[in-house]
Image (cartoon, helix red, strand yellow):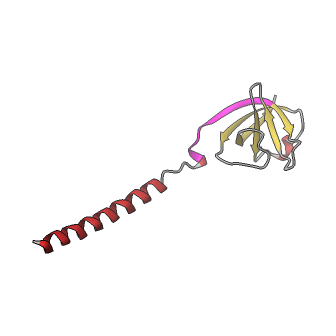
């Protein structure tokens, strides 16, 4: 009888280890990629960021956004634009506001 319980205990430990492994693998695949975020259209003024790291931002009525992939033709301080952006889960040394990827931009 003791042999039966010891085999049962070992079998339960193996199942528990498999369950933990499955849980770790499934939770590690739950991260969100930037392409899954929605896009939105914003209007505002391009701003040269006057911080240590530099960069470009978009000042809207409500917020200052840090821009990623702003085309060189639009790197003009004070330029009024409308752009389609995608939110990015990133951090930067400027820390001025949300970081967004520029998908398209036009002068207004």
Which region of the structure is painted magenta? 35-44
Q: Nearer the viewer, residue 97 or 37?
A: 97
Q: Eyeballing the image, is 65 above or below 35?
A: above
Q: Is residue 98 magenta?
A: no
Indicate the position of residue 8 as horizontal and vertical percent values.
19, 67
Tell which residue pokes out farthest to the front in this image: 2
Q: Eyeballing the image, is 94 above or below 65?
A: below
Indicate the position of residue 80 as horizontal and vertical percent values.
84, 30
Q: Eyeballing the image, is 29 above or below 18?
A: above
Is 40 positioned to the left or the right of 108 in the image? left
Q: Is residue 38 magenta?
A: yes
Indicate the position of residue 30 as horizontal and vertical percent values.
48, 51
Point 76% across, 43% down: residue: 95
Tell which residue pokes out farthest to the left in this image: 1
Point 24% across, 70% down: residue: 10
Q: How many circles with numbers are drawn on the protein? A: 0
Tell which residue pokes out farthest to the bottom in this image: 3
Main SS of the magenta segment? strand
Is 30 positioned to the left or the right of 76 in the image? left
Indicate the position of residue 34 as horizontal and vertical percent values.
61, 47
Point 90% across, 37% down: residue: 77
Tell which residue pokes out farthest to the top in this image: 61
Q: Nearer the viewer, residue 77 or 97?
A: 97
Is 12 positioned to the left or the right of 25 in the image? left
**Quarter of the image with the C terminus in it:** top right
Point 59% across, 38% down: residue: 38
Where is residue 76, by image quadrant?
top right
Q: Nearer the viewer, residue 18 or 2?
A: 2
Q: Eyeballing the image, is 26 above or below 56?
A: below
**Quarter of the image with the N terminus in it:** bottom left
């Amino acid at each position: 009888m003791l042999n039966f319980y010891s085999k049962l205990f070992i079998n339960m430990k193996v199942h528990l280890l498999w369950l933990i492994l499955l849980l770790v693998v499934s939770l590690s695949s739950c991260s969100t990629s930037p392409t899954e975020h929605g896009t939105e259209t914003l209007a505002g003024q391009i701003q040269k960021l006057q911080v240590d790291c530099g960069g470009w931002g978009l000042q809207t009525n409500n917020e200052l956004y840090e821009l990623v992939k702003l085309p060189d033709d639009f790197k003009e301080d004070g330029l009024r634009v409308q752009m389609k952006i995608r939110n990015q889960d990133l951090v930067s040394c400027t820390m001025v506001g949300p970081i967004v990827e520029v998908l398209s931009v036009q002068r207004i």
